[in-house]
């Protein structure tokens, strides 16, 4: 693939060919999102055999690669720090897995990650568009998943709350933390789009309240906190230039202050989730697992480069921390690369003029950074990677004129 000057599609006439390209880009993004919805064996409304579920999710990546090639036949790409760093980490991870430390599963995960990144590279001509194309498709994927979760809750509420009383997707298996992640990102993006004047108030209210409602039903605290902080940072980036943001912040401050006084017992109960002091201080036992991973003896090469991509667990225990999980899989090198990815995105946002695209990107970056401390996904094909890819696309320079004219 070669790096060349690329045009902007939104400068082209709205022809049938242009609509066809946009449609295929949307399908590719949907396939990528479906691929990161890892299939888990949990009670569903309609039972899906585990093997079939895996074939569907992994097969969607193959289809995404093929369809992306039809959109970008000349293999034109735009370089960017996010994908360069992610690709370097993926290549090193594959080299480590080929040494045979983890097994065939690790090799498959590494190859899958490279294929996933290849699709993102093929979509880079569509980064920086004024019509926020990838963001639009990302939102459609988020709300499609939330709609399936809501439908499952209506059809079979018993199954939907079977996992510790927390909302779970039962049309397609989506675990409570993942439901929370999707709901929080959807709610935050809705709020920032309204603050930016890109979404009507009535539509924003319905989408925001619906997403927050599903988020609360998952009883996931980190996602809620990350969403609130992300919206705060995004709003502050628009504070000077948008009167709507200043009014919204003042109104929200008064509402939150009054609501906190009235509903303090209920809020304390929700955040406490019935846990004792020890469970709260150890983050429901997470810190114990993190200590085991960090303190486990390992040869010096594995300290720096890890053992290869795993299933984000240690001796059968979930790690639930992106940085610790990356350390196990890709060593200190992987953590440094992930840190550089976040830092590069933050610096790109810092030097970009105030705009809705900058505010939305800031929300996504801040959300992923905070939630990464209790969720895994920074160093692998995951909703985290797609969120950060959207942020990188929003921060990319506007592409020059005449792209993919073979279409």
Image: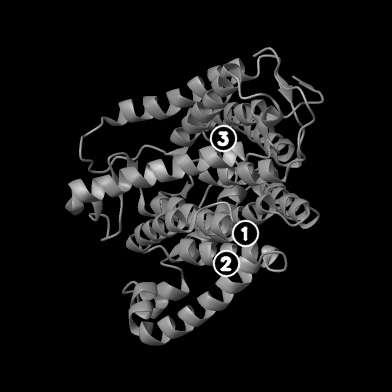
For residue 92, side relative to residue 113 (left or right): right
Q: Quadrant of residue 107?
A: top right
**Measured from the top left, where is residue 115 in percent x and y?**
58, 26
Pick the quarter of the image with the C terminus. top right
- Judge by depth and name the residue closer to the eye, 323 or 303: 323
Q: CA distance from mark 3 to mark 2?
A: 39 Å
| Residue at position x 67%, y 40% in the image | 393
Q: Quadrant of the N terminus?
A: top right
Mark 1 to mark 2 CA distance (whole Å): 7 Å
Residue ranking furthest to the bottom: 261
The residue labelled by disc 2 is 229
Q: Dot 3: within a 10 Å radius of its alpha carbon, few (fewer than 14), some, or many (20 or more) residues?
A: some
Badge 3 or badge 2: first in the primary sequence: 3
Q: CA distance from mark 3 to mark 1?
A: 34 Å
Q: Which residue is mark 3?
A: 101
Pointer 1: residues within 10 angstroms few (<14), some, or many (20+)? many
**Disc 1 on helix, strand or loop?**
helix
Q: Is residue 272 visible?
A: yes
Where residue 88 is drawn, which disc sits there?
Answer: none
Name the foreground residue: 105 vs 372.
372
Q: Earlier in the sequence, mark 3 or mark 1?
A: 3
Residue tagged 1: 366
Q: Is residue 308 visible?
A: no
């Amino acid at each position: 693939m070669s790096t060349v000057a690329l045009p902007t599609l939104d400068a082209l006439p709205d022809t049938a060919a242009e609509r066809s390209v946009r449609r295929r880009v949307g399908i590719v993004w949907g396939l990528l999102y479906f691929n990161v919805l890892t299939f888990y064996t949990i009670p569903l409304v309609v039972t899906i055999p585990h093997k079939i579920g895996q074939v569907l999710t992994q097969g969607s990546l193959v289809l995404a690669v093929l369809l992306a090639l039809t959109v970008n036949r000349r293999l034109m790409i735009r370089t960017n720090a996010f994908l360069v760093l992610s690709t370097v980490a993926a290549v090193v991870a594959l080299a480590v897995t080929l040494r045979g430390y983890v097994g065939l599963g690790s090799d498959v995960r590494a190859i899958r990650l490279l294929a996933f990144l290849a699709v993102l590279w093929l979509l880079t001509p569509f980064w920086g568009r004024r019509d926020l194309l990838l963001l639009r498709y990302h939102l459609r994927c988020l709300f499609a998943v939330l709609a399936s979760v809501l439908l499952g809750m209506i059809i079979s509420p018993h199954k939907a709350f079977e996992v510790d009383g927390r909302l779970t997707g039962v049309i397609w298996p989506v675990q409570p933390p993942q439901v929370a992640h999707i709901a929080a990102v959807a709610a935050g993006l809705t709020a920032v789009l309204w603050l930016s004047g890109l979404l009507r108030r009535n539509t924003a209210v319905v989408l925001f309240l619906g997403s927050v409602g599903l988020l609360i039903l998952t009883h996931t605290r980190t996602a809620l906190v990350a969403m609130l902080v992300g919206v705060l940072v995004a709003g502050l980036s628009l504070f000077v230039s948008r009167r709507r943001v200043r009014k919204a912040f003042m109104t929200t401050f008064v509402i939150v202050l009054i609501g906190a006084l009235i509903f303090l017992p209920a809020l304390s109960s929700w955040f406490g989730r019935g846990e004792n002091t020890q469970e709260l201080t150890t983050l429901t036992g997470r810190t114990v697992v993190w200590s085991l991973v960090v303190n486990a003896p390992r040869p010096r090469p594995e300290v720096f480069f890890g053992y290869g991509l795993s299933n984000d667990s240690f001796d059968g225990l979930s790690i639930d921390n992106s940085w610790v999980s990356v350390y196990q899989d890709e060593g200190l090198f992987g953590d440094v690369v992930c840190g550089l990815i976040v830092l590069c995105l933050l610096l790109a946002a810092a030097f970009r003029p105030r705009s809705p695209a900058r505010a939305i990107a800031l929300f996504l970056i801040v959300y992923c950074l905070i939630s990464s401390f209790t969720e895994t996904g920074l160093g692998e094909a995951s909703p985290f990677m797609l969120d950060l890819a959207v942020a990188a696309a929003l921060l990319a320079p506007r592409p020059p004129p005449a792209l993919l004219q073979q279409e």
